Amino acid sequence: MSTFLQAMTNGVLIGGVYALVAVGLTLIFGVMNTVNFAQGEFLMLGMFTTLMLAETARVDPYVFLVLVAVAFFVFGFLLEKYLIHRTIDRGHETQILLTLGLSVLFKSLALVIWGPNFRSAVVSYRLKSLYVGGVLISYPRLLSFGVAVVVMLALWFFLNRTELGRAMRASAVNRKSAALMGINPDLMYGLAFGIGIMLAAVGGVSLVPFYYVFPDVGAFFGTIAFVVVVLGGLGDILGAVVGALLIGVVEALTAQYVALDLSHLGVFLAFILVLLFRPQGLIRGKGWA
């Protein structure tokens, strides 16, 4: 029983990071109807940026959480305004090719700047754990999950309790009606893309204390994010959160009871089952409520 609880706990904790990346991806799709295939690479850039700043200043990576979040929000906003926005009315094929191109570009730049080697941050609590009810809870993973919870709550408050957030939700539900009500769709697009990129970068910051940093790290988390988004229902934020936690738990249980090398097998098996029996997603239509 303790082994099962341990696996469940590990799955939920890593599911928080999956949720950050996936919610950013689903927010972009929900508002802009654009699929961002470079989402994982923004997480990778957030990790490298945080690691570089932490190593230079010799302080904890979390010190730069707000700075990295703001920087990537601005980067995402400007990227949407001057590049992504040009593809809004050109179909998904153009958007996919552009974001795939950005993915390759960012990965190549990371290889040139930081090299292909695995790197990690030096933090005093990297191997520390809390012992609760017979379960070991990794301290850095717990911090990462805590960051995810706080960010998700802040996003919920923004979307549901601010005029700007409600305008973004209105744009996601019906762009034309929102525009007729005086909402600037171009601004909503920029904000959605900026917030989506910021969430991926924040996920990267929270990974740095316990996860290796390397140029291909974004490919894995980007793939998981797409699985989560489909599981939760395209454009559904609540579904993305539930899907992320589910994927984290399935991955951890598969690693524990099947084989560590086959942990992704359970993830994609769950993905196939959901596509077969509930293709509309787990909680379709409730994520913007």
Image: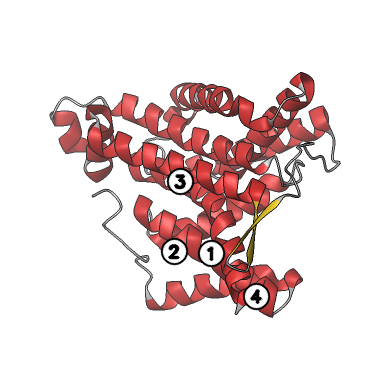
Using the image, determine if residue 258 lies above or below residue 165: below
Q: Amino acid at mark 3?
A: Val
**Marks 2 and 1 in Cβ contact (< 8 Å):** yes
The spot of residue 18 in percent (x, y) is 54, 52
Which residue is identified by label 3? 149
Q: Amino acid at mark 4?
A: Thr
Residue 3, numbered circle = 4
Q: Secondary structure at mark 3?
A: helix
Q: Secondary structure at mark 2?
A: helix
Using the image, determine if residue 58 lies above or below residue 196: above
Which residue is identified by label 2? 231
Question: Can residue 128 be spotted in the picture?
Answer: yes
Spatial separation of the CA atoms under disc 3 and disc 4: 25 Å
Residue 247, numbered circle = 1
User: How many residues crowd mark 1 within 10 Å: few (<14), some (14–19), many (20+)?
Assistant: many
User: How many residues crowd mark 2 within 10 Å: few (<14), some (14–19), many (20+)?
Assistant: many
158 relative to 145 in the view: left or right: left
Q: Secondary structure at mark 4?
A: helix
Spatial separation of the CA atoms under disc 1 and disc 3: 17 Å
Judged by depth in the image, the label closer to the viewer, 1 or 3, is 3
Q: Amino acid at mark 1?
A: Ile
